[in-house]
Every structure is written in structure tokens, then in C-alpha cells.
Amino acid sequence: MEHAAAPRGTFDILPTQARRWQALERIIDDVCGRFGYGEIRTPMFESTDVFVRTIGTGTDIVDKEMYTFTDRGGRQLTLRPEFTAPAVRAVLEHNLLQTLPLKLYYRGPIFRYERPQKGRYRQSHQWGIELFGVAGPEADAEIIALGMEAIEAIGVHDHALEINSMGCDECRPRFRDALVAYLRDRAGGLAQTSRERLARNPLRILDSKDEGDRRMLADAPTIDRFWCAACREHLEHVRALLAAMGIESTLNTHIVRGFDYYTRTVFEITSSALGSQNAICGGGRYDGLVREMGGPPTPGVGLAMGMERMLMLVDEARSAKLDGASRVDVAFVALDAQDVHSLVPVMHGVRRRGIGADMDYTRRKLEKQIKAAGDAGARLAVIVGGDERSAGEATIQDLQTRQRRRVKLADVGDAVAADLAASRAANGSQ
């Protein structure tokens, strides 16, 4: 019988890889915490209406990519393809808007039926932030600054910020009409997907990757010609605040986001290290979304980053930021069943001190256990064989210097704690 395999477009995170994921998650927790954001966790599936109402028909996600099913109660449910709509649903359900501003962050899997490729999966992982209750440009600037800080924190410095404004309900319709008029006369030259979008969601054509569409759009009207004074001023202030923080931004009037709910500021952070699929992060402002989902008028702004793409960037940058050290500092080595019986309580005491410790219960030969402990990143080995056991002692071996010493079993905890502290102090002084 053949072994089962993970579904196409998904992958397993094995223990050797999980350390990097854990290190990335710790960095995200740290950066978001320093900016005052609290974590929210929402279900992995929601009522389908949560996404159709907010993301919008005519988008690839709603039309082609959502994993939707009917449960046994006849309810239409969808595995979440993104986090913002579920976050807003949770905020409204639990009355979190009573105290503003509200700062949230999240991380976890999302699900989209896409063609699997490097850095893009059908179950991928995303983290993001949302800031509710602040209409001013300082909120947009903070969101972007947090995203840039997270990228810097993983040791990646090859990145660029591109920014645009989608306008508001006053100025965006004028741009939409001008774009439709321009494209309608040239519809025969558009890709099939773009022709379908022309009637339902023409602004999404701006995000087309088709080369023919890109050439046609080069001469199309651009939204900056239609901004009202308030939208223009808002974007200028966002960019001025970013510049004051040392963050450069480039205006790109072709940037749109894949969801209908964005207004005014939209942005992308890219890196040339990822080649043509260079986007790391995207986000923007969505002042009408909370009201659209049944809540009070509430401004909002946020961003999201793909975690797989961040790990790819770390590899490209050869950053050591996610090279998580082994959690096992001390390997306990027993040579027979009696030695195991002697060492188990000692190892438990060491673990209770907050020190990572483990034992190879297979009782392989001493040399193989020592080598495996060193390969796993342990600094010390605590060895008990017949001689040590009869004397009520253990041998402590430094796996880097190969030095050994004997201590009483009762003193092993104090001894390894002192040795590890001395080792860390020496490394810190170098």
C-alpha cells in the first residue's frame, strides 16, 4: 500500500524547520508588542458571506480561489482566504470598538485554490495587523513602519516601499469612469480575465500581470489626476511622516489591492531578492469596511505578510536572525537501565531550572550518544555508567572543549547551571 502524501499545494513543517518558524513568530510577537498591538485569533472558517460581502465579486479570490463547502447543517462556510474580514467580524461580535484606537495582530494559515509555485501554496501562512479608529495619516504611517520594522528584524535590508491612493467615494468614481472609457475602446486587446473584469471590477485590471495588458495600461488615465484635495493631502502627509522616520516611498499609481474594501492609502513592500514575484507585504486603508459589515462608521488600516515569503527572504539574505539555537543545552547519557533510573530524576531537576535537557533512551554506545548530542546543539553531556553510578557521581563533559569533570549526582543541577552561565558569559564578552 502506498503512503499517503500531503495534498497538492500544502506542506509539512518538520521539527528541524519548525525552529525557524518559531523564531519568526517570536520576532513578529516582539515587533507587534513594541508597537502596542494585541494578538487576536479567529476560526479558520467563517460564513461565506463574510468574505463575499467584503472582498467583492469579480476578484480572483471570490470567483476562483475560495475553499467553500456546505456543512451538515446546510450552512455555507469558507476556509479563510484572508484575515481582515474575520478580524472585523470578531471586533463587532465582541463589541471591541467601544475603546478606540484598537490595535490587533494575528498570524496563522490561510487557504486559496491557486497554482502552487515557489512561495505560493494552497495552505499558506500569513501574519498581519489592523488599526481601527484613526482616520489620520499617522495611522497609515505607523502600519507601514511596523511592517518595515518586521522585515528589518529578520535581517533583510533589500526592500522598497511603493505607495498609492485609491481615492475616496468622491474622486474614485471619476477615475473609474475614465479608465473604463479608455479600456472599452481597446477591450479586444485585453486578456480574457481583464475583459471579464471590465464590466464588474475594472480597477482590478490595473493589477494584471499580462504583458499585453501592461503595455495598454502604460497610456491609461492614472488615478492621481482625479484625487480630490483631501485624498491628495492625506497621501502627502503619510509620505511626509514616513520620510521623517527615514522610510523612503515611491509613488506607483498602478498599485491596487485585491479586495474591494480599500480606500485611500494602498501600498506594497517588495524585494528584488524574490525575482519577478517580488511582493513581501501589502496593505492599506479601509474606512468603509466596518460599516459595510454592520458596525458603526469606523476608519481602519492594516497590512499582511506571507510568512513563507519572509523565510525565503531570510535565505536569500543569508540572515542568521532565524537560526534558532537548540533548546537542548544538556544531553544526559545513560549506558544501561540502571543508569537511566539514576539520571531521570536528575534530568527532571535540571529541566525545572529552565534548562533544556534530553536523554537518548535507546542507550546506544557512548560515542554515538555523544556525537548525536553535539550534532543537536547541546553544550554539555552528563554521563553515568557503572563507575559513576557506584560512586554516586556523574561525569560532565563540555562538548566543545572536550573537558570532563566528576560531580556528585546531587550537585549536577548546580554544576551544569554554572557551566552554562560561564559559557554564555564568555561568548558574550568575545
Image (cartoon, grey):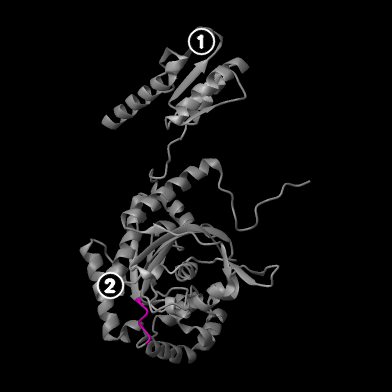
The vertical placement of 5 against 51, above or below, is above
Residue 414 can be seen, yes or no: yes
Kind of element beneath mark 1: helix
Q: Which residues are magenta?
A: 165-169
**For the view shown, which residue lies furthest in the left direction?**
244
Kind of element beneath mark 2: helix
Q: Is residue 154 left or right of residue 331?
A: left
- Residue at image position (60%, 56%) is 10
What label does residue 137 carry, if any? 2
Labels 1 and 2 touching (C-beta < 8 A): no
Residue in front for this viewpoint, 91 or 108: 91
Counting from the top left corner in percent of width and height, residue 169 is at: 38, 86
The vertical placement of 82 against 371, above or below, is below
Q: Residues within 10 Å of mark 1 (few under 14, many from 20)?
A: some
- Residue at image position (53%, 26%) is 372
N-term mark: 1 or 2: 2
Residue in front for this viewpoint, 414 or 419: 414
Mark 1 is on which residue type?
Glu
| Residue receiving disc 1 | 388
- Residue at image position (56%, 22%) is 368
Q: Quadrant of residue 121?
A: bottom right
Mark 2 is on which residue type?
Pro
- Residue at image position (40%, 90%) is 178
Q: Is residue 360 magenta?
A: no
The vertical placement of 88 against 384, above or below, is below
Q: Estimate the spatial distance between the alpha carbons at disc 1 and disc 2, rounded to whole Å.
A: 69 Å
What label does residue 125 carry, if any? none
Counting from the top left corner in percent of width and height, residue 29 is at: 39, 52
Q: State whether the magenta stretch is mostly helix, strand or loop.
A: loop
